[in-house]
Amino acid sequence: MSRTYRSGKVVAAVALAGVLAACTGTDGANPPEPSPFEAGSASASASSMPSSLASTAAGSETKCALLPEDAGWYGDNRDKINAMLQSVGTCGGEGDVAKGAPLALFDWDNTIVKNDIGDATTFWMLANGKIRQPEYWKSVSSYLTDDGEQALQQACSNLAPVGEPLPTHEPQGAKCADEILSVYTDGETTTDLDAFSGFDARRIEPQYAFAAQLLHGYTDAEVQDFARQAREENLAAPEGHKQRIGTQDVTGWVREYSQMTDLITALKANGFDVRIVSASAEPVVRVWAEPLGLTGNKVMGVKVKHDGDVRGVHLESCGGDESSMTYIEGKRCRVNEEVFGITGPDAFKPAPLDKRAAFGAGDSDTDVSFMMDATALRLAINRNKTELMCHAYDNEDGKWIVNPMFIDPNDKKDEKYECSTEGEILSNGEEGPLKDSAGNVIEDQEDTVFGKP
């Protein structure tokens, strides 16, 4: 479907003269191969990559890969990305950051795909009666309020013995399904009471953690099987599909952004080490990332401690903090610790320039720290998330580019982003003035890069 984009503020240009002309990459004229995300697809290979890039990935005579032409790229974003590929990358195939290759980091949900795979899996668990009855609900999340504990206990306690699946897929379990759904999606009980409290809002989002913790009692292999089934259903469902959970209608479809799979393929072909850092449960992200050839240490998500092979509810720590997960500064921590070997409290701080990613892509405030650390280029997918978009539009160092969502992009935000007063998410969950890296308060920003079908 074609889109009409309205012009926005021009971000700092990247010199392209001679760079693109010297490259023998393709122009995207060939029709695309089937998506690696299609139902039933296996791991990524040259045959599952976009045809415009497959020859490079397979090691043919093509020297370097460029992004194919695509109407989904706003303005000169594609040209700026191609210039980065040529100036930072090295033609010849995927690299390893441990051997000096440039690192590219991507969020997953609403960055590589439209909609949220954490949602898709949680909704599938509820729709199929797979969530196990805990001994008490605060044992699942220590951040649950008394109101949250009481609401879940009243709705669910009499439906199954401890350790057995709750019948959230049956009529008698509808109230329990509604309560779990409300706590997870809204952070509130069905009676509008706060469900979580007492957390550092720059290191953890208890709602996202709750989704990973609800998978307790299963092995990672079992969780991956659930995620595959949810994946198949969500990819097969028509765009805009709603599914019924309890008495509520929720999103029931996911789609790949072909532009982002092209980008990942091009980055890998140009010698980048491409990795995912997501606030969804790690086994779930692994299922979705596998078709792109992103496996093993290429995938970072929310991790929990295990009892043998069985998943528990306590989060794995980062930087010595067990209250951290892959969320805002927790994403930075995981990258610094796991990729660059920076440990302790320093893992939450910006790393030295030689221990940072070259490229970062994300769509939400949860991505802002790892994206700000990127040294060459940062791609913000515009979902009107204030802290991220304030930094992107302010574009302090000229390394930000903004693109509307590739599927069903948002219309123009009616009012300016309130960067100067409510731009930053504070540790206590409130909002305050957002500052750039030099300590200057960022002025309120107008939404200028947007579009609609």
Image: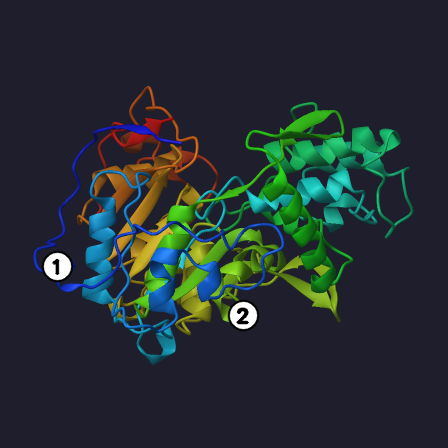
- Nearer mark to the viewer, of 1 and 2: 1
Tell me where residue 242 appears, x and y as whole percent.
64, 29
* Spatial CA span between label 1 and label 2: 36 Å
Amino acid tagged 1:
Ala
Colour convention of the picture: rainbow
Tell me where residue 355 appears, x and y as whole percent.
31, 69
Q: In the displayed orientation, state which residue is furthest to the top.
A: 414
| Image-based side of 274 in relation to 136, left or right | left
Residue located 62% across and 37% down the image: 237
Closest to the observer: 70 or 351? 70
Q: In the displayed orientation, state which residue is furthest to the bottom.
A: 99
| Image-based side of 321 in relation to 123, left or right | left
Find residue 21 and name its label. Answer: 1
Residue located 53% across and 67% down the image: 295
Amino acid tagged 2:
Gly
Q: Is disc 1 surrounded by few (<14), some (14 to 19) or many (20+) residues within 10 Å? A: few
Tag 1 secondary structure: helix
Question: Compared to 337, does 53 lie above or below?
Answer: above
Q: Earlier in the sequence, mark 1 or mark 2?
A: 1
Residue located 44% across and 51% down the image: 107
Closest to the observer: 300 or 396? 300
Reading the image, the residue beneath label 2 is 296
Tell me where residue 44 appears, x and y as whole percent.
50, 63
Closest to the observer: 297 or 418? 297
